Amino acid sequence: MNKNPEASRTLEELEGDSWPDPPAESTSLVKTVHGLRRRPVGGLTAYELGRLIGQDVGLRWTLPRALEILRETAPAQNDGGFYDDDLLSAVLTREAATWVAHPDLAREMREILHLLSDLSPYIERDRKKFLEASEGID
């Protein structure tokens, strides 16, 4: 269940900022991000959230939804099920200032990390950087 009360709204609505269509020569990532800003936050997939978060777009709304997905999928990951490392990496690699601005989200991410085991080497590296960046944030 989506805990975000604004899940039915788009990032454009939440931010009060409608971006123009990207130029025709834009990369597919730019075009994708522009399109995703027009979709309800609660309907975004883990992959789509990873794209937005990786570009620091709408973090106030995308990070809470991403953490919800990561918490929901942590038990399956530990049981050998599918786990979206792209979303986890996107969340873990945000700048330290993001976690300073959102200490509640940093605390929740630390809790989620305690639920995970057998992380790939590149995710383990991201985990260590996150823990260092969020150290002392409460």
Image: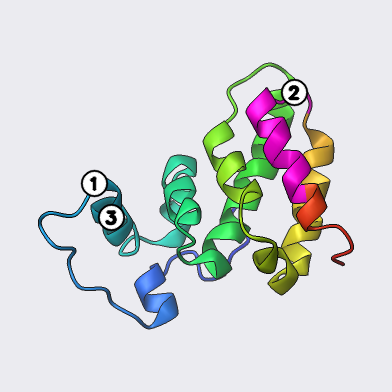
Residues drawn in magenta: 117-130
Residue type, label 1: Ser
Q: Is residue 96 magenta?
A: no
**Which image quarter: residue 96?**
bottom right
Question: In which image quadrant can residue 113 be found?
Answer: top right
Disc number placed over residue 47 in the picture, else none: none
**Rendered position, 93 above or below 18:** above
Which kind of residue does numbered mark 3 sit on? Val
Residue lying furthest left in this view?
24
82 and 91: which is toward the camera = 91
Q: Residue at x 10, y 57 (%)?
A: 24
Kindly report the distance in space between the C-alpha atoms of the residues bearing marks 3 and 1: 5 Å
Coordinates of residue 11 in the picture (x, y in percent) = 40, 69
Circle 1 sits on which residue?
28
Q: Which residue is mark 2?
A: 78
Q: Position of residue 136 (x, y in %)?
A: 89, 63
How many angstroms separate mark 3 from mark 2 (CA)? Answer: 34 Å
- Residue 8 in view: yes
Q: Secondary structure at mark 3?
A: helix
Left or right side of 93 for 21: left
Answer yes or no: do the residues labelled 2 and 1 have beta carbons within 8 Å? no
In the image, farthest residue toward the bottom: 16
Q: Which residue is mark 3?
A: 30
Q: Are marks 3 and 1 in contact (CB under 8 Å)?
A: yes
| Residue 106 versus residue 48 in the image, above or below | below
Q: Is residue 15 above or below residue 41?
A: below
Instruction: Give how far across and how far down residue 81 sits, in percent.
Output: 63, 19
